[in-house]
Image: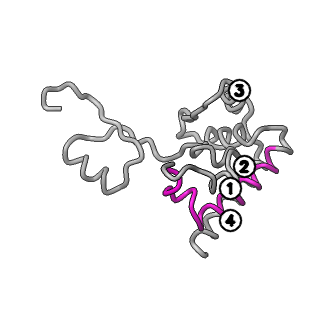
């Protein structure tokens, strides 16, 4: 940095504490928050309780807070709600969650991982089909219910 080779620094998924530490070394120009719509396939409907239980012992998701209880139950309930909204709008759940992320004016792109070409086509459709106000309200309500369940509120 002192040699002038780094003009702008960006970080991904940093906590507030990490950002404060880094600011002492170099200004942070951009933060990519943990706003991944697919969250490793979970909100896209790729996982069931049985599939999570069948993960190999060395699979990193076995220790992920998204894939372990009590969060797993709340996340699977959220996905079921998303499935209903997607079905009514003749969308896949993947397209729905990407469209939800893209609705935010501060989001300039959605980072979406895919394993098969069909998944790319499926989620890319979200760019051309924004959410309806009703779909947005329903998703926000589902997320609030999930959060309340997670915090016991």
Within 10 Å of the Cα at label 3, are there few (<14), some (14-19), or many (20+) other Cα atoms? few
Image quarter hosting the C terminus: bottom right
Q: Magenta-highlighted stretch: main secondary structure? A: helix
Question: x and y percent of residue 13 in the render?
Answer: 42, 47
User: To which quarter of the image does residue 15 belong?
Assistant: bottom left
User: How far apart are the alpha carbons under marks 1 and 4?
Assistant: 9 Å
- Give the secondary structure at mark 3: helix
Q: In front: mark 1 or mark 3?
A: 3
The numbered mark, 1 or 4, whose residue comes first in the sequence reads: 1
The numbered mark, 4 or 2, whose residue comes first in the sequence reads: 2
Q: In front: mark 1 or mark 4?
A: 4
Circle on res. 145: 4
Question: x and y percent of residue 19 in the render?
Answer: 31, 50
Magenta-highlighted residues: 60-86
Q: In front: mark 3 or mark 2?
A: 3
Do callouts 2 and 1 mark residues in contact (Cβ within 8 Å)?
yes
- Residue marked by disc 1: 140
- Residue 4 is covered by the magenta coloring: no
- Give the secondary structure at mark 4: helix
User: How far apart are the alpha carbons under marks 3 and 2?
Assistant: 25 Å
Q: Name the residue at 76% across, 55% down.
A: 80
């Amino acid at each position: 940095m002192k040699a002038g080779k780094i003009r702008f620094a960006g970080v991904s998924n940093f906590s507030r504490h990490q950002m404060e530490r880094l600011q002492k070394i170099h200004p942070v120009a951009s933060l990519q928050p943990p706003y991944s719509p697919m969250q490793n396939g979970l909100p896209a409907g790729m996982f069931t309780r049985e599939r999570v239980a069948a993960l190999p012992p060395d699979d990193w998701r076995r220790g992920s807070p998204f894939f372990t209880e009590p969060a797993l139950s709340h996340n699977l309930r959220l996905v079921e709600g998303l499935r209903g909204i997607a079905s009514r709008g003749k969308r896949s759940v993947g397209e729905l969650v990407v469209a939800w992320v893209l609705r935010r004016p501060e989001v300039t792109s959605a980072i979406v991982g895919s394993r098969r070409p069909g998944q790319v086509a499926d989620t890319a459709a979200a760019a051309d089909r924004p959410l309806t106000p009703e779909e947005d309200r329903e998703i926000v309500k589902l997320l609030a219910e999930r959060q309340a369940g997670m915090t016991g509120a």
